[in-house]
Amino acid sequence: MGVYKKVKGDGARNIFPHQVIKNLLTVRVVKLRCNDKYYLVRTELNGKAYLGFRAAGIAVPPRVLELGKNVVGTSEITGEKCPNIGKF
């Protein structure tokens, strides 16, 4: 079953797949290092972006995901003061 049918078949009236995709494209994720631990922090979901995750059959990812201490590879944001991670 296509994404269009899944979104429309979910009881989402007046929602078009291009709107869902446009909303999904606004989601951003950044890797953050705080006290030698790494986290992935994502932005809020805009509009009907959650329908894209639902149509794909996966859960919406958490706002903050702790990765642990030994993470290599991508760029990161660091600073002397760490934000209150629990606030997300």
Image (cartoon, helix red, strand yellow):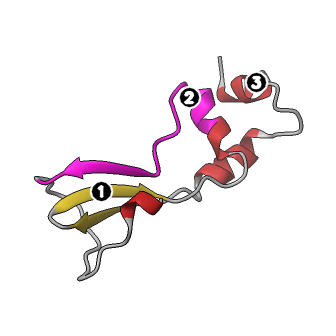
- Label 3 vs label 2: CA separation? 12 Å
The residue where tag 3 is placed is: 10
Which of the two marks, 1 or 3, is nearer to us in this view? 1
Q: Earlier in the sequence, mark 2 or mark 1?
A: 1
Q: Estimate the x, y position of residue 86 in percent, counting from the top left.
A: 41, 58
Q: Earlier in the sequence, mark 1 or mark 3?
A: 3
Label 1 is placed on what type of residue?
A: Tyr
Left/right placement of residue 36 relative to residue 81 reads: left
| Residue identified by numbered label 2 | 56
Point out residue 4 in the picture as x, y percentages from the top left corner. 72, 29
Going from N to C along the chain, the mark reached first, 3 or 2, is 3
Q: Nearer the viewer, residue 35 or 57?
A: 35
**Residue topped by disc 1:** 39
Above or below 14: residue 37: below
Label 3 SS: loop
SS type, badge 1: strand
User: Relative to residue 4, is residue 68 drawn left or right?
Assistant: left
Q: Residues within 10 Å of mark 3 (few under 14, many from 20)?
A: few
Where are the magenta residues, as a range? 52-69
Tag 1 and tag 3, C-beta contact below 8 Å: no
Residue drawn 66% across and 52% down?
A: 23
